[in-house]
Image (tube, rainbow, N blue to C red):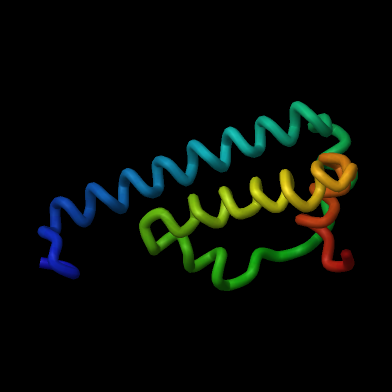
């Protein structure tokens, strides 16, 4: 048992969490590319590296999905509700300087 859960159940939770992560990440990427444009995204992408916390979150079930949903929330609340564009959000997420 791992954390009070049988190994098979724990592995199932991990696989389901990773599947949800990839689903949300792909849908968020499609949403951004639809609103910004793929060529514009490629041209305006910065060189910002993901933090170590984001990289390690793949090993914790559902953590990466929660980070993606956090980014969606930031997009909606901070950028779109204040009149900023999807492109400004993309630049914020991918550049070192904000």
**26 to 71, vertically: above or below:** above
Q: Residue visible at 49% across and 42% down?
A: 22
Residue 23 is left or right of residue 45, and the answer is: left
Q: Residue visible at 87% across and 41% down?
A: 85
Residue 46 is left or right of residue 73, and the answer is: right
Q: Residue visible at 66% across and 37% down?
A: 29
**70 to 34, vertically: above or below:** below
Total number of numbered discs in the rendering: 0
Residue 36, percent from left and from top:
83, 33
Residue 24, percent from left and from top:
53, 40
Quadrant hosting residue 58: bottom left
Residue 98 is left or right of residue 76, and the answer is: right
User: Which quadrant does the C terminus fall into?
Assistant: bottom right
**61 to 51, vertically: above or below:** above
Residue 53, percent from left and from top:
55, 71
Residue 57, percent from left and from top:
47, 64
Q: Residue furthest top?
A: 34
User: Which quadrant does the N terminus fall into?
Assistant: bottom left
Q: Residue visible at 47% across and 46% down?
A: 21
């Amino acid at each position: 048992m791992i954390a009070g859960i049988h190994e098979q159940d724990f592995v199932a939770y991990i696989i389901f969490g990773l599947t949800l992560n990839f689903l949300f990440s792909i849908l968020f990427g499609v949403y951004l590319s639809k609103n910004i444009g793929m060529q514009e995204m490629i041209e305006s992408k910065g060189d910002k590296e993901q933090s170590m916390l984001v990289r390690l979150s793949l090993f914790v079930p559902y953590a990466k999905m929660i980070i993606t949903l956090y980014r969606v929330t930031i997009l909606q609340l901070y950028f779109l509700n204040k009149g900023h564009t999807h492109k400004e959000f993309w630049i914020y997420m991918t550049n070192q300087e904000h």
